[in-house]
Image (tube, helix red, strand yellow):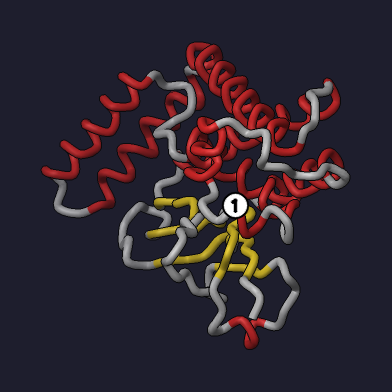
């Protein structure tokens, strides 16, 4: 996850560091989509360009890739798996056997059905790439290039592989990307967040965050899929705190 975050940061810096972001030419649909992804975009566009662009890409990856039950399943198949897990949970005395079922079942898909799921995974990858480039080009006034898009394609495909790896574990590994909404205070949490501003954690104890540039990963439960009350932060979310 850390490598993916570093790769995304480098991709944004290399391809957009000289770009000037402009909201004036965006149509209503694009503004609405941007507002849904990053509601605080108007505050970030002039002061935290790189972090804003990272946040847009990260939100899309979380929504389209990491929130999937297992990348490559159709919507109908995903719904069936979720319903089965819910049904098993209604019979099981604890979370452990259900998480073991999920892990074993998805391990079969990962091991034995890569070709059957390849077309759907490739289609999702291209859809994510298209959505990201459309939004960023509209915002930055840039144009697609083979080098830029091939780098993004690698990031999207790496996200898919990572998402699959996370969901086959018996423990529940959740992506941690708290939404930042207007008129709602989200405070800096040193246990789950890493500040990109480089300030001392003690100085950030009472500060709000204005942007989550890249999500973290939190592990719930043990290696057998039980005791979900136990929490371990695997990777901290990368956030930007509001100025004092």
| Residue name at image x 75 percent, y 44 percent | 21
Q: Nearer the viewer, residue 32 or 220?
A: 32
Residue, far front: 24
On the image, the x and y values in percent for residue 86 come to: 20, 39
| Residue name at image x 34 percent, y 26 percent | 78
Number of numbered callouts drawn: 1
| Residue name at image x 63 percent, y 34 percent | 26
Q: Nearer the viewer, residue 164 or 203?
A: 203
Left or right? Give the position of 108 relative to 233: left
On the image, the x and y values in percent for residue 196 come to: 71, 66
Q: Nearer the viewer, residue 164 or 98?
A: 164
Q: Is residue 60 above or below residue 178?
A: above
Q: Is residue 17 above or below residue 202?
A: above
Left or right? Give the position of 25 relative to 206: right
On the image, the x and y values in percent for residue 238 come to: 63, 61
| Residue name at image x 69 percent, y 50 percent | 5
For disc 1, the marked residue is 41
- Point out the image quarter for the C terminus: bottom right
Disc 1 crowd rating (10 Å Cα; few below 14, some 14-19, many 20+) is many
On the image, the x and y values in percent for residue 51 come to: 70, 54
Q: Is residue 228 above or below residue 86?
A: below
Residue, far left: 91
The quadrant holding residue 101 is top left
Element at badge 1? helix
């Amino acid at each position: 996850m850390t490598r993916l975050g570093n790769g995304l940061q480098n991709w944004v810096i290399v391809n957009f560091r000289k770009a000037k972001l402009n909201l004036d030419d965006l149509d209503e649909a694009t503004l609405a989509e941007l507002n849904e992804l990053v509601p605080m975009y108007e505050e970030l566009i002039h002061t935290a360009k790189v972090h804003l662009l990272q946040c847009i890409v990260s939100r899309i990856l979380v929504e389209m890739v990491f929130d999937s039950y297992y990348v490559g399943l159709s919507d109908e198949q995903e719904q069936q798996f979720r319903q089965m897990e819910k049904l098993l949970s209604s019979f099981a005395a604890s979370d452990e056997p259900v998480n073991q079922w999920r892990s074993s079942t998805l391990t079969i898909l990962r091991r034995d059905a890569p070709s059957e799921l390849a077309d759907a995974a490739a289609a999702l990858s291209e859809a994510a790439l298209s959505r990201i480039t459309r939004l960023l080009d509209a915002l930055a006034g840039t144009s697609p290039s083979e080098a830029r898009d091939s780098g993004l394609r690698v990031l999207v495909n790496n996200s898919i592989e990572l998402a699959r790896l996370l969901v086959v574990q018996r423990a529940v590994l959740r992506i941690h990307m708290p939404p930042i909404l207007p008129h709602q205070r989200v405070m800096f949490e040193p246990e789950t967040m890493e500040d990109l501003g480089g300030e001392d954690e003690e100085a950030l104890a009472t500060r709000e965050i204005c942007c989550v540039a890249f999500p973290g990963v939190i592990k719930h439960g043990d290696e057998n899929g039980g005791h979900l009350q136990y929490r371990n932060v695997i990777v901290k979310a990368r956030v930007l705190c509001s100025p004092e």
